[in-house]
Amino acid sequence: MTSGAQTTGQVEAEINAVIAAPTTSRWLKAALADTLHRDCIAAARDAELLADLLGRRCDSILGRV
């Protein structure tokens, strides 16, 4: 994962590389492919909410509350 200022093309190339990677789950490949056709703000907000919910669920399961 890279950080800092990147062009849209660079970010989309990184997304496509993750999609093409054989170790990437089918679920993540489908989610990333879908985001390329969605409003970028809505997709980013949905991803933030998903990450928050899954992170808190994981913390709860592992007893890190």
Image (cartoon, rainbow, N blue to C red):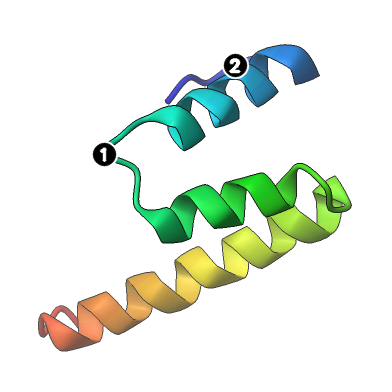
Q: Secondary structure at mark 2?
A: loop
Q: Which image quarter: residue 45?
A: bottom right
Provide the residue designation for mark 1: 23
User: In this rendering, would 49 be left or right of 28?
Assistant: right
User: In this rendering, would 55 be left or right of 13?
Assistant: left
Q: Residue at x 53, y 70 (%)?
A: 50
- Tag 1: Cα neighbours inside 10 Å, few (<14), some, or many (≥20)? few
The disc labelled 1 sits on which kind of residue? Thr
Mark in the foreground, 1 or 2: 1
Q: Which image quarter: residue 61?
A: bottom left
In the rendered image, the quadrant that contains the C terminus is bottom left
Classify 61 as above or below 36: below
Q: Secondary structure at mark 1?
A: loop
Classify 19 as above or below 7: below
Provide the residue designation for mark 2: 4
Q: Pick whichever, 6 or 12, lies toward us.
A: 12
Can residue 6 be seen at all in this image of the molecule?
A: no
- Tag 2: Cα neighbours inside 10 Å, few (<14), some, or many (≥20)? few
Q: Residue at x 55, y 22 (%)?
A: 14
Q: Are marks 1 and 2 in contact (CB under 8 Å)?
A: no
Residue 4 drawn at (x, y percent): 59, 16
Residue 38 drawn at (x, y percent): 84, 53
In the rendered image, the quadrant that contains the N terminus is top left
Q: CA distance from mark 1 to mark 2?
A: 25 Å
* First-in-chain label (1 vs 2): 2
Classify 11 as above or below 52: above
Q: Pick whichever, 26 or 7, lies toward us.
A: 26
Q: Residue at x 56, y 55 (%)?
A: 30
Residue 28 drawn at (x, y percent): 46, 54
Can residue 60 be seen at all in this image of the molecule?
A: yes
The disc labelled 2 sits on which kind of residue? Gly
Residue 24 drawn at (x, y percent): 34, 43
